[in-house]
Image (spheres, rainbow, N blue to C red):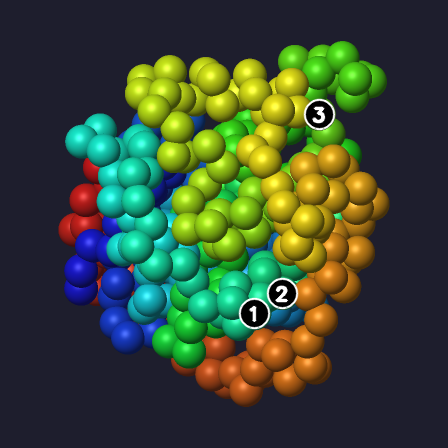
Amino acid sequence: MSLIGRGATGAVYQLNSLIAVKRARTGEDEQADHANEQRMFHFLENCSSIPYVIRCYYRRPQDTFLEFVPNKCVATLLNQYQERDSHGTQVLKVSQTLDSQDIHRWMRQLCFAAAGLERIGLVHGDISPGNMLLDADWNLKLSDLDRGMKIGEDVVVLTEPFGRLLDEGDGEGLGTYGKAGARTETFAIGSVYYTLLRGHEPYETEPWGRDRFVILGEKFQNKEFPPLTDSAGDAIIRKCWSGKYQRVKELLAEFTGDAEQCEPTDKDQGWLETRQMECKEFVQSGFVDTLDRY
């Protein structure tokens, strides 16, 4: 057993080579977000499997048992090639960018996951490199569904640069993040694509210090985005930031690939039932209750 990480809503522990558990943090808001993620997994259980969304094996109040994904997240991978200032908010140098084939594959897998959620009327609501995990085969697993919601619901919070407040030119919703749907999801995916191509988030190289998120929020609300080139990749980013995609499925079509790129389906019902049994054994042993919630 080892502590993998502590996020906004919970602490995650590896239990064995296949299973991790997320324990809800002790705060009321954090527990509410964790409960929302469990509702999302409950909804997914009643639908056909969605490729590249992290799998939930078992749930009980305030504990969610997930597939263990060993290669951390895309944000961690990017950080390995970044030199930052002493505060950690500004990227001073990127020593290496990601392989173009990896970028294309991960973008296709990300869009596949988001389009699958869209197909059943859901949005992820917090797409970012930090929520894009990498499995043993370096394929993507979209995680952290605590901000997930139904299409058409009001978005209470997003995090720039993976969302933007609406301005007067957007029509209704001035000063809010608007309604959840293709606009919010493809905007986030566009910022992810920008980040993967350049090795840093939009405006992350600017020396804005403690005012970074205030300035970033204002610029994005005013549609003052970082300069883009005439490349095919930047053309996609421009369309994402401009709200040109009516469905995530349209964005997925930009990242062509073979059918074999779909997630393997070799985990039959018997395999899943074995994982569920293991989760229950961890609970019954009392071991999970000894793990700190923070």
Q: CA distance from mark 1 to mark 2?
A: 5 Å
Q: CA distance from mark 3 to mark 2?
A: 26 Å
Secondary element at tag 1 = helix
In the rendered structure, the answer to whether residue 95 lies left or right of residue 138 reads left
Q: Position of residue 192 (x, y in %)?
A: 54, 48
Q: CA distance from mark 3 to mark 1?
A: 30 Å
In the rendered structure, the answer to whether residue 99 lies left or right of residue 83 reads right
Is the N terminus in the top left, top right, bottom left or bottom right quadrant? bottom left
Badge 1 amino acid: Arg
Give the farthest residue toward the front: 230
In the rendered structure, the answer to whether residue 186 lies left or right of residue 83 reads right
Q: Is residue 46 above or below residue 293?
A: below
Could you tell me if the residues under marks 1 and 2 are in contact, i.e. CB atoms within 8 Å? yes
Q: Which residue is mark 3?
A: 178
Is the C terminus in the top left, top right, bottom left or bottom right quadrant? top left
Q: Position of residue 70 (x, y in %)?
A: 32, 68
The disc, 3 or 2, on the residue closer to the chain's N-terminal end is: 2
Near mark 1 (Cα within 10 A), the count class, few <14, some 14-19 or many ≥20, is: some
As drawn, the label of residue 108 is 2
Residue shown at the point (69%, 57%) measured from the top left: 232
Q: Which residue is mark 1?
A: 105
Q: Position of residue 23 (x, y in %)?
A: 32, 47
Secondary element at tag 3 = loop
Residue shown at the point (49%, 23%) measured from the top left: 216
Q: Would you say residue 110 is visible in this rendering?
A: yes
The disc, 3 or 1, on the residue closer to the chain's N-terminal end is: 1
The quarter holding residue 179 reads top right
Badge 2 amino acid: Arg
Badge 3 amino acid: Gly
Question: In front here: 7 or 109?
Answer: 109
